[in-house]
Amino acid sequence: MENKKLSRYVDELAARVNGVVEESLGVLVLKVQAPYIIEVLRGAKEFPFVPCDFLHDLCGVDCGDHFEVVYQLSSLHGPQLLRVKAIVDRENPVIDSATHVWEGANYLEREAYDMFGIKFKGHPNLKRIYMWDDFEGYPLRKDYVTEPIEVRNIVRTRIEGE
Amino acid sequence: METLKYLMETLNNLFLIIAEFIRGLFADPHSVWANLTMNVINFIIVVIIVVLAALILILLERKVAGWTSQRPGPNRLGPRGWFQTIADALKLMGKEDVTPAGADKFIFKIAPMIIFCLPMMTLAVIPYGRGMAPIDIDLGIFYFVAISSISTLCFLMAGWGSNNKYSLLGGMRAVAQMISYEIPLLFSLLGVVMITQSFNLGVIVEAQDTIPFIVLQPIAFVIFMIAGLAELNRAPFDLVEADQEVVAGPFTEYTGLRWGLFFLGEYGNMTAMSALAATVFLGGWQGPGFLPGYVWFFMKVGVMIFIMMWVRWTFPRIRIDHLMHLAWKVLLPLSIVNILLTGLGIYIYRFVMGG
Amino acid sequence: MSIDKTQELVLNMGPQHPSMHGLFRMVVHLEGETVTHIDPKLGYLHRGMEKLAESRTYSQFIPYTDRLDYLASPHNNWAYVQAVEKLMGVEIPERAEYLRIIFGELARIASHQVCIASTALDMAGWSAWSYAFRDRERICDMYEMTAGSRLTVNIMRIGGMSAEPPEEFWPALQSFLDDTPEMLEEYYGIFFGNEIAMGRLKNVGILTKEMAENLSITGPVLRASGVDFDVRKAEPYSIYDRFDFKVPVRTGCDSYDRTIIRMDEIVESIKIIKQAVRDIPGGPIMAKVPKVIKPPVGEVYHRVENPKGELGFYIVSDGTTKPSRLRIRPATFINLQMLPIVAKGWKIQDVVAIFATLDAVLGEVDK
Amino acid sequence: MFGKGLLQGLGITFKRMVGPNITEFYPEEKPNLPIRVRSSMGLEKDKCISCNMCAMACPNSVIKLTSEKNEANKKVLKTYHMDVGRCLFCGMCAEVCPTKALKVTQEFENAIYEPEDMQWDMIKRAERKGKVE
């Protein structure tokens, strides 16, 4: 019911930015290329009647050959849910920052940068948020090698007389 | 009946009799040497009072904290945990004395010593019983307030000398807070001074033989309590050592016995302030005759201290701007109004009585 | 004129600081006592939950969700198992749903009690703190007798509940529910009705409605800014549509409302639990799920109303026993974004209080 | 009136001050824990069929067990080790155990001095426990 109304606008939007609309477990998913993302987010924010005006979540996903930045959009005034996926190139992961659309994207984008190395153009303070500043590598990428359990498991033994 | 009365009289003047006895050992009971000996003995007694008060009060504080939150408090060492403070003191003595790098060493080290001296100096003018003031000076109240205001300086010294930002913030807060609250504190005492026409604490107590001044000066008492709490940096005015904001304020960098000296000083000051409140407003050693005067005095001090602790464990901490508003916009005008009313009252009283 | 300007003091608060609720660290720029800029630094409790999930099977990750928002661990279990159930299309038995509601709402009460307590403690209200924790102990006891643990409860499984509550659980729950009005009265008397606390919290740290929506704030913090939004009403998950309860909304937008709204929520939670206890049916507590959990290829995003905000799980499954990507949407992590904006211009004492009213749990913030 | 809340607060704390205590005298009086409390693990060696279910259910690969075949070609437990330093005490191992050989127990005083002591030899622990009781 609600989805139908939303689906019309999403289709319109998808046609404009040549994205793909899918449906997954009752939620509309709009897949677009990275350069269109700000247009999509602004468009979704201003849907008539069913505005997806609340940035619920933003995260990166490693899909093997490319990254996706997944935006979970919803609204505080209705049940509409929209998932926007921006396809980001793996070699040169750059995408426009959503902080100008929603200020709340600030930390979420920093986290995605920290974990996947996706660079958000126009972000006010794009620094690592969880890992320390000179940490090397991006932990949530699939090709990141974690240290083996034996290395991590070393417990410092007490020296006698300490 | 007569013997009972005689016994009571003896008990009441027990310490005076002892003092007379010691003076009697000298050829001339009022020679320089006799006075000097008496002064030394008085000094030792005051030191004992400060240390004992700190020992008991630290335990009592923890007990009250426990009781308010439905715990028994310290209960391991000795009967019901009564030796806890001694163990704490021993532990503090065994600790390493750390002076932070970059500290202003002289100031850092001297601050706790000074703050430990202050309660001894102030407690020396309190009359513990009839004629039992270790030093009986005419400007007692004046002296008391003057000495206790030095502690501001100690907090600032500790805060500055520690080379720590939290300490500095705490020290600055101490200055702002304690200087502000000294004024209403002194003004609240002025009402009593106006009634008795004397700064002498002994005279003030004598004047309360019929009625304690809390009845005549209730507003002044409340102002004194609030300003006294602020002056002592006790909750809800403990912004100086607010552990949720500035960790421990000026005491952050202190360890071991230096830190312990701060504690001794704090509880000593608390005793002194309670003693002043008991002397000025609650009638000091005056009380029904079935107990000696000094017992009455210490009971009153105890009640005052208990109220302070009770307040501490109940109230949240006040904010610094509210603190300043309270001092300058509420307490100060109120205390001035109180002085005015007291003056009017005295005038009317004289007019009616004197004709 | 540079002479009438005080020098800026850069103060590092945390990660070891009495009021930093765990391992939060912020660099505060001060002018005197007034805050000019706050720079929160996160990551001191970062355990890499999302990475860990990729090397654990779906069931094995349930105990880890306990460690997210450890003050309301049943809620994290709930969000996670519901996301997996949604992905697999599992219907769970009625009784399990009711039990989940009961434990979820108990967790909400416990979490809010901790919030009230820690807000009081951050303002040196020692007794308020100890009373709230005293009452929370009873909820912990109920967890303990049912699931065997007091904090990291690990009570829900994919397809139902791990254990049926024992006999003595129901009387304990009933007596707790009976005592709650008295408890709330006590919290009010000692903390919320106290003039000093009011002075500290009222009109401090204003977060307007527009700011809250723009900053993706959720949970009680959002509702204290006058937005009537609760996932339990907006998108009823589990069986919340069967219960009669209100969503408390306050319009003060200040620290006081952000704290006291939790008292209102406790009242509503008690209402829900009472209805659940009344209506709970008998029957099994576990659905038939395969021993090895292997959801189909696909993705799901599921959100629940955690006591602190909306907790979301975004799971991408590649058809194996382990998730390909598991994304946790931590509520307080996003709510924390308001701290530098809201606290600017207030005193350092207010920063501590504002941070306390956010009810940040660093297990969730740092994942 | 200003001050009413303050007096109310004082009243509440005074009421609690004279009221009863709620704490336990822990080392003297041991708490009586419910039987579901999972503060440590106990193994009954004879019941164990070495199915390795516990090791597979464990999120942190805490459990390491080896077995050998006896004359009747049945698996018999040889060693059973738990690396408690990595244990979450989630109780998943005890939950999946088909014969209930591995159980949660209520010994909660698990503090140790040496890191090596975190390697629990469950068979030895079971024997030691038998001796004590």
Image: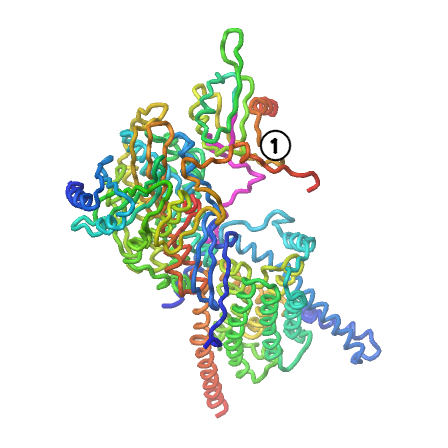
**Residue ranking furthest to the right:** B27
Q: Is residue B62 left or right of residue A62?
A: right
Question: Which residue is identified by label 1?
Answer: D116
Q: Is residue C142 visible?
A: no
The answer to whether C161 is drawn above or below residue B283 in the figure is: above
Which quadrant does the C terminus of chain D fall into? Answer: top right
The image quadrant that residue B64 belongs to is bottom right
Kind of residue at disc 1: Glu
Residue B278 in the image: x percent, y percent?
57, 71
Q: Is residue C160 magenta?
A: no
Which quadrant does the N terminus of chain D fall into? Answer: bottom left
Pinpoint the chain carrying mark 1: D
Q: Is residue B177 left or right of residue C218?
A: right
Dominant SS of magenta comes to loop
The answer to whether A93 is drawn above or below residue B92 in the figure is: above
Residue C73 in the image: x percent, y percent?
40, 40
Q: Is residue D21 magenta?
A: yes
The answer to whether C219 is drawn above or below residue D49 in the figure is: below
